[in-house]
Structures are given as structure tokens and as C-alpha cells.
Image: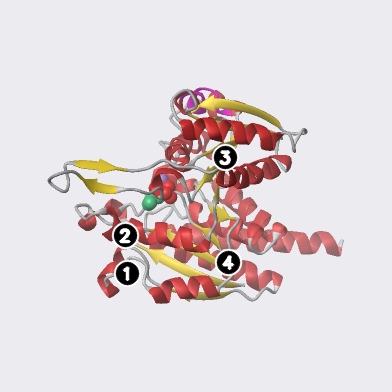
Amino acid sequence: MKITVLPGDGIGPEVTAEAVRVLRVVGAIHGHNFEFEERPIGGVAIKQTGSPLPSTTLDTCLAGDAVLLGAVGAPEFDSMPPNLRPEAGLLLLRRALGGFANLRPAISYDAIAATSPLRSEIARGADILIVRELLGGLYFGEPRGFFGSNGDSVARNTMIYSVAEIERVARVAFETARKRRRKVTSVDKANVLETSQLWRQTVSRVARDYPDVTLDHLYVDACAMHLITTPLRFDVILTENLFGDILSDEAAVITGSLGMLPSASIGGSVGLYEPVHGSAPDIAGRGVANPFGAIASAAMMLRYTGSLEQEADEIEEAIRVVLKAGYRTPDIASGETRLLAKTSEIGQLVCDAVDELADMRHSYHAV
Ligand code: IPM
Ligand code: MN
């Protein structure tokens, strides 16, 4: 597997380094040949080349099998127009790779259930998969920009969806639900928006092909509330781009920290795997960032691009082992935490746990 690594800005390089380290260990154990190529994206790319997505970066991504990305964004670009910001590099990359279905799992891990500000009887056991449409809606709709007589007295963005765009992401949600608890909640704002009415009609029609999966619909405002009052009511949440962006940050509250959340963008020519968290410039370079989201993204890469289900399971199990042993980065620490760990220590601990799981598997087979 040829993996393009795009560390990006802020804590991106710190967390991707740990994900790569875990992948190397898994590759060695299972005899897989993972090749890594590193390229710039985002703010660091703007500084080196003037562009947030240099053509050499894009070409390398397109020539490989999968992309592992850290984060983009830096405060020094805050006053720049959207097309010159680090984030533009990520949006161009998403579109070029073509992954229209962005899978964002939010799980309440038992060992850190108390980290969530939600009462543990509400959060415990939650296991949600948000399927976010990634290449449409307000993020990419035209026309967009600043207009008006002064050139900037009015700004406009366009929310637009076609039946085809809705249908393809809906199918991913239903297919994925079949491997889970067979329930899809489609989220829209059909009481106000035409795009949402089309969304609801299309999802309902697609649902007829999946009679074994239960479908319900929620308005996005109600969903925002139910997510944190009754997270256990959800299995798969299917929604459009901006709603999915917002709801996935909110879902992080269930897990305890945004640093825990991974993502996979699938359905295109090359899979894109990135933690949901941003570049966190305030803590960058101090070795305290939470690498679990990046490491779990690497697991999703093995599952969805590599079809390496067992290897992916082992990484996810190793994450649980390390959490259960009590190791914490500051964002998931509490008053009871005694084992505060650096970013790189967490990476090493996950590698050790992966190794141990492999040993256990061998001795089990030997018996
Ligand atoms: C995310 C991020 C991105 C998004 C930004 C960095 C463009 O917030 O992946 O959720 O809005 O999609
Ligand atoms: Mn976001």
C-alpha cells in the first residue's frame, strides 16, 4: 500500500507521526509492505510554495492508494479570503480524491466515559457513525463570493444538491448500517430548505432497497439536542456537508474529546483518512496532542482502502487496551489520572499493545 502522509499544520505533524509508527508495526507483524511519502499541505505549503495544495502534493496523492492527513489551519491566515487559506488546500484535495462519504465514528469508550461532560448513564455505550456528505452543499456550491456595489457589501454561498449526490451517499449509509445495528437517521432541515426536501425524498426512496434497515428523519436542530440528551438512540446518522461538520464536533462531547475522533472519506479514487480535530495551534509543538484520532484514522485506512479488517480491529483493540491501562493525554485526563502521557508515549504504548495482541494470537493458535 502506497500511503501519502500530509502532516499539515499545528499538531498535525505530531499526531500523524504516531499513526505512521503504529502502521509500521502492524505492517511488520503481518508482513505488509506499507510505503510512506510525505508532502506539504495547508499553511506550511503556502509558506514553502505559495499554494495550500502544491501540484506535487496532489500528484503524489493521486498516484498512491491512500492519504493520511494531520490537520490544516493557522491563525496567521485568519484574515485571508477562503481561497487563499490553508483550509482551501484540504477542500481542493477532498474534491480531487473524490471521497464523497465521510465516515465519522463517535464512540463512548468505557475507560474514559467519565471524561465526557455528559452524565455517564447518558453517554456510556454510545456508538454512533456519522456519514457526512463531503463534496456538495454550501462548501462547494456556486455562485459564491463577495458581491455588491462596493465589491464586498454582500456575500453569498449556495446550498445545492442533486438527486445523484444524495443517493450515492445514502447508499453508503445504508450499506454501513447493515454491518451495525441497522438503523439510519437522516438529518435535514426539510421544514425550511428545498435542498433538504430533496434530501428527505431521495433518502426515503433509497431506503426501499434496504427493507432490513430502519430509517427515521430528524430536523438538524432537534438532532443537535437528541445527540447529547439521548445519544444511545442513534446508530448511523446520514446528513449533508455543513450539518455533518457541526454535528460531528458536537458528537465529540460523547467521547470526551475531539482528539479521539477519526474519519475516513471513501467512494473516490483514493481514500482520505484524517482525524476530525483541527490544527490546535495553542498546543502545537509541545508533545501533548492526543494522537488517538489520528491512530484510529490509520485503522480506518487499513479497513476501507486495504480491506485489512483484522489489522484494523487490532489497532482499535490496542487503543482500548491503552485507555483501559489508564494512560491519558491532558484532553482526556481527569482528577483521577495518574498516567499522564505525551503524544509519542501514547504512540509507543499503542505499538506495544499491538505487539502483545499479536503474541497472544500466536500462542493461541499454537495451542
Ligand atoms: C473538518 C474541518 C474542515 C471542514 C475544515 C478544516 C475545512 O472542520 O474536517 O471537520 O469544515 O470540513
Ligand atoms: Mn469540522
Q: Secondary structure at mark 4?
A: helix
Residue 144 percent coordinates (x, y):
32, 48
Return the residue at label 3.
109
Q: Earlier in the sequence, mark 3 or mark 4?
A: 4
Q: Which residue is mark 4?
A: 23
Q: Is residue 39 above or below residue 332?
A: below
Magenta span of residues: 225-231
Q: Residue 86 got which mark? A: 2
In the rendered image, residue 275 lying in the magenta stretch gets the answer no
Q: Which amino acid lies under the numbered mark 3 shown in the image of this protein?
A: Tyr
* Residue 137 placement, left or right of 184: left
Q: Is residue 315 above or below residue 219?
A: below
Q: In the rendered view, tell whether residue 234 sits above or below residue 290.
A: above
For badge 2, the amino acid type reads Pro
Q: Main secondary structure of the magenta part?
A: helix
Q: CA distance from mark 1 to mark 4?
A: 25 Å
Give the secondary structure at mark 1: helix
Asked whether, in this view, residue 11 is left or right of residue 66, the answer is left
Inter-mark Cα distance, 3 to 4: 22 Å
Discs 1/4, front: 1
Label annotation for residue 45: 1
Lower position in the chain sequence, tag 1 or tag 4? 4
Q: Earlier in the sequence, mark 3 or mark 1?
A: 1
Mark 1 and mark 2 lie on one chain; the one further toward the N terminus is: 1
